Image (tube, grey):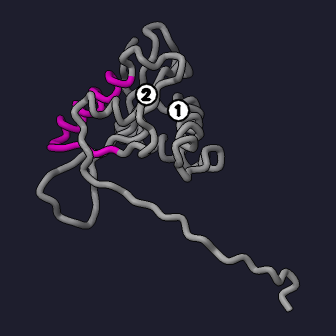
Amino acid sequence: MRIERPTASAVDALAELWVDLAADQRTHGSHLLAAANHASIRESLAQRIVSGGVFVAREDDGDDDDVLGFVTFYPESGGYEQDTDRGVVENLYVIPERRGEGIGSDLLTAAEDALAEGGMEAITLDAMATNERARRFYRRHGYEPHRVELERRLERETDTNEGGG
């Protein structure tokens, strides 16, 4: 297995894997609509490939469509000055039949190394609160909670007067 930066020819395969990732995250409460975001994520992945913010895992003899997993990452940017330069790791995904083989760890390490080489001093990432497997994975790699996002569903009254009159 090898970790490498993909070429633009891998964007369609990566977009399909992202749809699988997003669909899986729905079981943990994600609000992302997997298939509905296919075009948007394809464009985002194409931009990340060009900027060097993607690594893929492939079999040693695999081609561009034979992706075992991927990770996207970038330096955090925003309008606020901070005391630490942070990188962001997103979308770490390994195909289900290959999980537990160290592929995710290798992808994460590659992203961390690239961010460190770019001058980042810390890395942030998100995991769904109910995705205990992902949270355990990140804890094993030294990640600790930094912020907690809270959510509350709003109840809305439904209009019982459908005729509008």
Few, some or many C-alpha atoms within 10 Å of disc 1 (few <14, some 14-19, many ≥20)? many
Q: Is residue 108 left or right of residue 99?
A: left
Q: Nearer the viewer, mark 2 or mark 1?
A: 1
Helix or strand or loop: what does disc 1 sit on?
helix
Residue 75, placed above or below residue 165: above
The magenta region covers 104-125
Amino acid carrying mark 1 in the image: Leu
Whole-percent x and y of residue 32? Answer: 56, 50
Q: Are marks 2 and 1 in contact (CB under 8 Å)?
A: yes
Residue in the image at 84% along x and 80% along y = 162
Mark on residue 14?
1
Residue in the image at 15% along x and 43% along y = 121
Amino acid carrying mark 2 in the image: Pro
What secondary structure do most residues of the magenta stretch adopt? helix
Quarter occupied by the C terminus? bottom right
**Which is nearer the eye, 55 or 109?**
109
**Which is nearer the eye, 21 or 54?**
21
Q: Is residue 108 left or right of residue 22?
A: left
- Return the residue found at the far left: 83
The answer to whether residue 25 is magenta is: no
Residue 91, placed above or below residue 2: below
Q: Is residue 104 left or right of residue 143?
A: right
**Which is nearer the eye, 155 or 47?**
155
Whole-percent x and y of residue 87? Answer: 25, 45
Whole-percent x and y of residue 9? Answer: 53, 29
Q: Is residue 18 left or right of residue 134?
A: right
How far is mark 2 from mark 1, CA to CA?
9 Å
Q: Which residue is mark 2?
A: 6
Residue in the image at 52% along x and 23% along y = 95
Residue in the image at 38% along x and 27% along y = 5
